[in-house]
Amino acid sequence: MNSPQLQRGFFLFLLAAVTVAFVWILMPFFGAVLWGVALAILFTPLYKRLLNKFGNRRRTPAALATLTIVLVIVIIPLSMIAVTLVQDVVLVTQRIRSGDLNFVNYFQQIVGALPAWVTNLLDRFGLGNLEAILEKLSAGAAQGSQMLASQALSIGQNTFDFLVSFFVMLYLLFFLLRDGADLSKMIREAVPLARPHTHYLLNKFTTVIRAVVKGNVVVAAVQGTIGGLAFWALGVQGALLWGVVMAFLSLLPAVGAALIWGPVAIYFLATGVLVKGLVLIFVGVFVIGLVDNLLRPILVGKDTQMPDYIVLISTIGGMALFGISGFVIGPVVAALFMAVWGLFMASNEEDGNAPRT
């Protein structure tokens, strides 16, 4: 009954059970853990520089200094933007409900400015029933306003949960910075893989997270800032809100920010405001688009060594499953998928080339 095979089988079952239980316990703080790990990987080079200045044995002061820098340059500015964004969301929602901001009227103005041949073309494809389209737009605008209001309200109601997750993230970030090297060594020794394979996969994991977070955040911040400033200069109401929306949508490579500035440019052109429309198209194509085409391949694709279409598909799929955190999870899973299959193919080639006995 106490054979070595039975003991090992029971031990592996126990190991899998406690691992699943531990992951299940961490699930309520999944976002906090994810972003704690991501920020630790991103700011580890800064921590190592501070550690060299403080002395290699003073890891706690170096970790505290790094944590303070993260708060000052990342978290506090994002918190200020979030507070202002909530105020803008509430204001836009009130204007939609009062009728001051009516997307149906904007659509009617665009349709009214269309030439006759375009209207006939829409009729041929069954899109000429403007009343039905306007009803759907009205219903969509109402649902959108309710969603914005509920999200703004939920932010206020879930403040306690947010604060708990926030402090969990900071607490975890401190220990990951201070003890990250020891933890990485322990993982390398515990994973039942060949040592070169373990090093390769861990390096790929850290490289992809650093590239995705740094690259996508920089691209999103630049595109959102440019788009928001362009909207503000052209007199578009809610420029900060639309700039933040463009920043979030820019996490989707190639198509993101255009989903916002494109319809606005079409509205300007259709209503006769040609200068504003052409200016917005120029900024969108040659400035915002240039940022995406230049910075993203340099900051994301170059380090991850993944094709753009893999980055796009994995980002969309990750965000569909995991929300905003999916723009990190998706490319990381895709990169590890390609890395593991690459190791598998390489090992098969080595076995095939090995001399047979």
Image (cartoon, grey):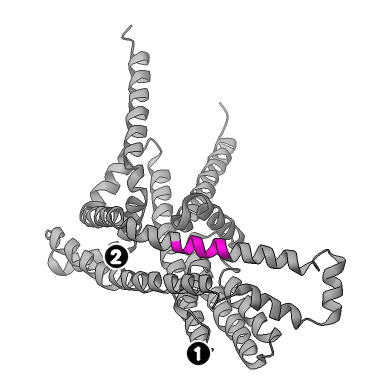
Segment tinted magenta in the rendering:
142-149
Assess whether residue 2 is covered by the magenta stretch.
no
Q: Is residue 335 visible?
A: yes
Q: Residues within 10 Å of mark 2 (few under 14, many from 20)?
A: few
Element at label 2? helix
Which residue is rendered at x = 51% and y = 55% of the image? 319
> How far apart are the two marked residues, 1 and 2, measured between alpha carbons?
39 Å
Which residue is rendered at x = 63% and y = 66% of the image? 138
Residue 147 locus on image (x, y percent): 49, 60
The residue pinned by badge 1 equals 233
Residue 29 locus on image (x, y percent): 33, 48
In the picture provided, is 196 more to the left or to the right than 261? Answer: left
Q: Residues within 10 Å of mark 1 (few under 14, many from 20)?
A: few
Mark 1 and mark 2 residues within 8 Å of each other at the beta carbon: no
Which residue is rendered at x = 35% and y = 38% of the image? 23
Assess whether residue 143 is covered by the magenta stretch.
yes
Residue 28 locus on image (x, y percent): 34, 45
The residue pinned by badge 2 equals 45
- In this view, the mark in front (1 or 2): 1
Residue kind at label 2, given as amino acid type: Pro
Q: Which of the labelled discs sits on residue 338, or is there none?
A: none
Residue 190 locus on image (x, y percent): 32, 37
